[in-house]
Image (cartoon, rainbow, N blue to C red):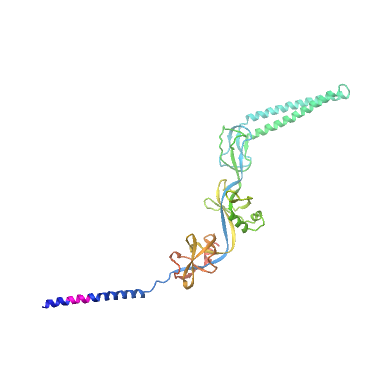
Amino acid sequence: MKTTEKKVLSLNQIILVSLLMPGIVLYSGCSSSSAGDNASAPPPPDLPVISVGSRPVTTYNEFTATLQGSRDIEIRPQVDGYLEAIYVEEGALVKKGQALFKIDARPYREQLNTAVAVLASAKAALENASINVSKLTPLVENNVVSDVQLRSAKAAYNAAKANVAQAQAQVQSAKINLGYTTITAPAEGYIGKTPFKTGSLVGKSTPEALTVLSETRNIHAYFTMSEVDFIQFKEQFPGNTIQEKIRNMPEIELVLADNSVYPAKGKVELAEGQFGKTTGTISFRATFPNANGLLRSGNTGRIKVPNLVDNSLLVPQEATFELQDKVFVYALADSNKVIGKPLTIEGTSGNFYLVSKGLKAGEKIVYQGIDRLRDGMVISPKNTSIDSLFKSASL
C-alpha cells in the first residue's frame, strides 16, 4: 500500500514540475533580457578632429616631356673617300673644333699639287705676256710696228691674267677639299651612334650621317597641352598675348625618370601656333641649363608648372576615403555625430587635397580612425591643430 502511494506522489510531483517549467524558463529569460538592457553601452570612440583651414599654396600641373639637345647636328662628309680613322668613341664629349673622323687625303693632296703647278704655269704665262706688252709699246709709239700687234699682246696678257685667277681659285678649292678630309666638331656636345667603321667608303651622297652631335650645354624639353590645359594656362598667367603669358610664367621644374627633381630650373620659351589636327594638343618648349652634362638627348621626364592659389581649403589625404570614385570626409555634426561629405578636388599640394566644394573654412572633420566610422555614429572629438600638419608639410 505504501509503495503505491509513493508512486502516486512521484507522479504528481512530475506533473507539477512540468506545469511550472515554462514559467520558470520565461522568468529566467525575462531576467536575462532585463539584465542586458540595464548593461551600460560602450563609450563613443575618442578620435582626433581638425578644423579645415585655408592658406596660399603652390600647386603643380605636370606634363610628360622629351628632351633634346639645343642642336642635334648631323655630321656628314663633304668629300668622297675611304674612312681612314675614327678619333672618338660613341657617347664621348667633344669640344668645338676637335677632330672626329679622317678620310683618306692622298687623292686630294695630289689635286692640290696639280692645282699649284697649274697656277705656277699660269703665272709664268702672265709674266711672258707682260714682257711682250712692254716690248711692243715703244715700238708702236715710234711707228715701227702697227698698233694691232700691241693690242694682240695686251689681249694675250689679259687672258694670262684670267688664267692665273682661275688657277688660284683651283688651288683654294683643292685646299678646301683637302681640309674636308679631316672632319671636326662644329660645336661642343656628345657623339651619338657611329654606323661606319674604318675602311668604309663614304661621301656626300651617303644617305646616313657619320654620327649625330648633340649640343647639350642647354637642353630643350618638349611637352604638350590639351585644349583644356591650354585654356587654364591662358587664364592662369597675365598678358594680352600668348608670348606675354609665357614671359610671365615662373620658372618650371623637371622630374626625371627616376622621380628625382633636376637641380636647375628651366624657362618656357615658345609654343606652336596651332593645335595638332590629329592629337588635339599644342606643343611647348622649355630650356634647362646643362653645364654638368647630366641631361642627354632622348631622355624623358615630367614638366612641373607651378600655380599659386591664394586661398584654397586644404584637407589632409589621410582624413579622406574614396567611394565610387568620389572622395569623402567625415564631418562633425550636432551632438558629435559624424556625416560623410563628398568633396570636389581641384588639385593637390604634397599630402593635401585642394578642395573647391563640399566643405567650408572652420568646419571640423575627423582626421584619423575613419575606417571605423559610419554615418550618424557618435564620437568623442579630440581637437588637433591643423597648423602643426601645415608646418610638418612645409606649407
Chief SS of the magenta region: helix
Q: Please say whether residue 289 is visible from this viewpoint.
A: no
Between 262 and 325, the one lying in front of the other is 325
In this image, 176 relative to 379: left or right?
right
Question: Percent position (x, y) of residue 177?
Answer: 66, 33
Between 118 and 44, the one lying in front of the other is 44
Magenta stretch contains residue 328: no
Magenta stretch contains residue 11: yes
Q: Is residue 225 placed above or below 95 in the rendered structure?
A: below
Residue at x 58%, y 60% (from the top left corner): 58
In magenta, the rendered stretch is 10-17
In this image, 27 relative to 236: left or right?
left
Quarter placement of the C terminus: bottom right
Residue placed furthest toward the right = 142
Residue at x 13%, y 78% (from the top left corner): 5
Residue placed furthest toward the top = 144
Q: Is residue 25 placed above or below 315 in the rendered structure?
A: below
Quarter placement of the N terminus: bottom left
Question: Percent position (x, y) of residue 73?
Answer: 61, 42
Q: Indicate the quadrant where residue 101 lies.
A: top right
Residue at x 71%, y 27% (from the top left corner): 118
Q: Please say whether residue 327 is visible from this viewpoint.
A: yes
Say how many tags the image has.
Answer: 0
Question: Percent position (x, y) of residue 228?
Answer: 58, 56
Question: Percent position (x, y) of residue 82?
Answer: 59, 31
Q: Indicate the quadrant where residue 182 lies.
A: top right
Q: Indicate the quadrant where residue 372 lies.
A: bottom left
